Image (cartoon, coloured by chain):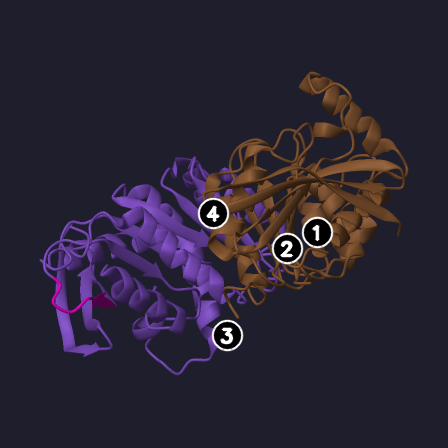
Chain colours: A purple, B brown
Amino acid sequence: MDWTVEWTGDTHRHDGVVERDFAVEVDGRRVPGVLWTPPEAAGARPLVLIGHGATAHKRIGYVTALARELVRTHRFAAVAIDGAGHGDRRTNPHDDELVVFSDFVTEWSREESTDDAIADWRTTIEAVRALPEVGDGPLGYWGLSMGTIYGLPLAVAEPRIQVAVLGLMGLVGPTRFRMAADAPNLVCPVLFIQQWDDTLIPRDSILELFDAIGSRDKRLHASPGDHAAVPPEEFVFSARFLARHLAAGGDDLT
Amino acid sequence: MDWTVEWTGDTHRHDGVVERDFAVEVDGRRVPGVLWTPPEAAGARPLVLIGHGATAHKRIGYVTALARELVRTHRFAAVAIDGAGHGDRRTNPHDDELVVFSDFVTEWSREESTDDAIADWRTTIEAVRALPEVGDGPLGYWGLSMGTIYGLPLAVAEPRIQVAVLGLMGLVGPTRFRMAADAPNLVCPVLFIQQWDDTLIPRDSILELFDAIGSRDKRLHASPGDHAAVPPEEFVFSARFLARHLAAGGDDLT
C-alpha cells in the first residue's frame, strides 16, 4: 500500500490531551484526521479508531469526548478521520445536513464504498502507528450507524482490531449483503448499541445484524428513544468496555 | 393484611454480613425467608427483594452472592423468600429438579398464583421493615425467569419499588396475559436481562415483553448463551444499577 502522511497545523495540548491534525493520501484521496495522545507519551499503547456517523465529522462532540476520555483516563491513543463526503472532505463546508446525508447515500451505494473506507482506515493506522508514542499496541474500534456500516467490515478485514463497539445499524441499505456476509466473520469482543425506538433503522434489521455477528463474546445494550438518543451511560460503558479489552498495552500499565 | 413473622434459628455473621432466617405466615401459608443486613446497622436503609428462578431456592448461589454484595459494598439490606413449591416450602427437599419444575408449572397455572406471590412478598416487606435497621427506606427488586413472572406484577402492585432488574422471561406461559396487562404499568427504572440463545423462552416473546414495559428508563442487556448462562458481569452490573437508583437511603450515605 502506497501512502503518505502530512502532519498539518499545530500540536494543541489542553487538559491532559495532545491533539494533532493530519491528512493521509491514499489512492489519490486526501483523508483528514485527528490524533489524540497523552502528554509525555513514550512507547506503544492501545489505539482506538473512532468512526463518526453520517452527516457528522471527525471532531463531532461524541467522538472528541470519547477520545479525550480514553486518553485522559487510560493513556490510550485515539484517532478519527472524516468519512468520504464528510467534514473537511466536503468542498462546501456549509452544506445543509440534508445535502450531506443525500451525498452519503450516493457514496454508500457506490460499489467500492466499503473497501475504500477500509483502505482509508488502514492507511491511517499505518501512519499514526509510525509515531513512537503510538506504536504497535492493540487496536480497538468504536463507531455507530455509518461508523458500523464501514467499521464492521473494517474489523473483519483488520485482525489487529481486538475489540469493537458497534450499533445503530441493521441489515439494511446498499451494503446490507456485504454486512451480512462479513458479520459471521467478526470474532473479537463486541458491544452492540441499539436504540429501541429507532425510526431510521428498523428494529428487526438491527437484531438480525446483532444475531449474525460471529463473536462468542458479544452483548447488546438497548435503550429507549430514537436513533440519535444514545444515553450518556452507553458512552461511559463504551470507554470502559474498550479499556477492559485493550488495557494491557498502555505505558501507565507496564 | 393479617400476618405474623417468626425469626427462626440463629443470627449468623461472617465476612461483614449479618444473616437471619425467618418465616412469615400469610393467609395460612408459611413463607420462609432470609434477611441480610450489614453489621452495626442502625436506621432505615434501601432494601432489595431478590426472587429466585424456578427449581431454585432462597439461598441459591446467585441470590446469596447478590445479597452479600449489596450489603457489603452498599450497606443495603436484602431479602429472599422461597417461591411456592420451592426450597423449604417443599414437603420433600430431595425431590428431583424435574419434579420441582413440573410442580412449578402447575402452580404457575393456578389462577391465584401471581396474587399469592405478591401477598407473600408484601408480608415479607412489612415484616422486615418492622426492624429498625431495615426501616422504611426505598425498595428495589431483582428477579429473573420465575423471578420476573412474579416480580414484574409485584413491582407494578407495589409503588414503593423504585427500581427493578428483570429478565429471562417473555410473554409466554399461563400468566402471559397478566404480564402483558401489567407491563405497561411498570414505570420504575428497569434493567432487563436477556440470553440471546435462550432455548426455554422464545427470543421474540422476550423482546415483546421488554417492549411492553412502560418505564421510560429501561434498558435491555443481551448476552450470548442459553437461559442459565447469564454472564457474571450482568450480576455485577445489576448490583451497580440497583445501588445507583437506591443509594440515597443507606446509613453510610447520610
Residue denoted by label 1: B128
The residue where tag 3 is placed is A98
> For the magenta stretch, what is the residue range?
A34-41
User: Which labelled disc corresponds to residue B16?
Assistant: 4
Q: CA distance from mark 4 to mark 1?
A: 19 Å
Vertically, is A3 above or below A96? above
Q: Say left or right for B50 vs A42.
A: right
Tell me residue B49's x, y (percent): 66, 49
Q: In the rendered structure, which amino acid carries the disc numbered 4?
A: Gly
Indicate the quadrant where residue A156 lies.
top left
Tell me whether marks 2 and 4 sit on the same chain: yes
Crowding at mark 2 (Cα within 10 Å: few <14, some 14-19, many 20+): many
What secondary structure is found at the residue carrying circle 2? strand
> What amino acid is at disc 3?
Leu
Instruction: Report the amino acid beneath label 1.
Output: Val
Q: Can the viewer see residue B165? A: yes
Check if mark 2's residue and mark 1's residue have beta carbons within 8 Å: yes
Residue position marked by numbered label 2 in the rendering: B47
Q: Secondary structure at mark 3?
A: helix
